[in-house]
Amino acid sequence: MWMIFAALLAAAETPPAPTPTPTPTPISLLAPSSAGTSSRPGSLAELARRIKLRLPEGSEGRTITNESLKTLATGVELTIAKAGPPVDTEGAEQADAEAEQKQAYWQERYWEAQAELEQAEAEVRRLEAETARLQNEFYSTDDPALRDGVVKPAWDQALADLQAARERLEQARTAPDKVRDEALRNGALPGWFRGTAPRRPTTGGAVQE
């Protein structure tokens, strides 16, 4: 009897074994692959660029903490974006070169029209001054032979040249706008025709506008 009592007393004093803590099941955050297998990114940086985080509705702006991670993770899905097609650098460089050639062509034509306009204006001013000088000389010359034989023909010629120069000036005034309008219809940009023409060196070493 005493042995049975000692056994019961020992069993009562023995502490119960602690219940083992269950190992938490990792939360699956990666969306299953529909193809079964996929190519692995070459680096962590590439993986980070291709990962898209899709949060459940109403989760935007929330701070993720250890307490809210389990609840929030039920609607989280990580997917890897497909890599885009390679950039055609050769085609882009060719397009840039063609655009530069097009710009240079229309700018050259526009600046030539501007230069012709400036030359026409300068020619009209010169002939106006020349006709005024010959007119004064004609009325101030007392010698009839010199006045009618030399000054008058020169004056008449200057008047004819002035009339022709004024007609050329009228045409030259519309030329730059015509070139610009034609260029815009062919895809040119308005900014190409702002500013003045670059200064170009001549064969003699001087600088030409």
Image (tube, rainbow, N blue to C red):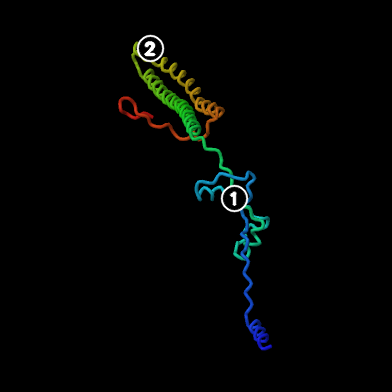
Name the residue located 37 percent from the left edge and 15 percent from the top edge.
Answer: 151
Classify mark 1: helix, strand or loop: strand
Q: Amino acid at mark 1?
A: Lys
Corner quadrant of residue 68 = bottom right
Q: Is residue 146 visible?
A: yes
Quarter occupied by the C terminus: top left
> How many neighbours does mark 1 have within 10 angstroms: few (below 14), some (14-19), or many (20 or more)?
few
Residue 142 numbered mark, or none: none
**Disc count in the image?**
2
Q: Is residue 193 visible?
A: no
In the picture of the structure, the residue carrying the numbered disc 2 is: 148
Q: Amino acid at mark 2?
A: Asp
Of 202 and 75, nearer the camera is: 75
Of 198 and 80, nearer the camera is: 80
Look at the picture and state if 99 lies above or below 74. Answer: above
Corner quadrant of residue 84 = top right
- Provide residue 158's location: percent of width, then percent of height: 41, 17
Name the residue located 30 percent from the left edge and 28 percent from the top edge.
Answer: 205
What is the C-alpha distance between the residues marked 2 and 1?
A: 96 Å
Look at the picture and state if 51 lies above or below 16. Answer: above
Q: Is 178 left, or right, of 57 in this rendering?
A: left
In the picture of the structure, the residue carrying the numbered disc 1 is: 52
Q: Is 41 left, or right, of 24 in this rendering?
A: left
Name the residue located 61 percent from the left edge and 64 percent from the top edge.
Answer: 23
For the residues carrying marks 2 and 1, which lies nearer the camera in this image? Answer: 1
Name the residue located 50 percent from the left edge and 34 percent from the top edge.
Answer: 92
Q: Is 179 left, or right, of 147 in this rendering?
A: right
Look at the picture and state if 132 lies above or below 194. Answer: above
Quarter occupied by the N terminus: bottom right
Look at the picture and state if 68 lies above or below 113. Answer: below
Residue lying at the far bottom of the rendered structure? 2
Q: Is 130 left, or right, of 106 in this rendering?
A: left
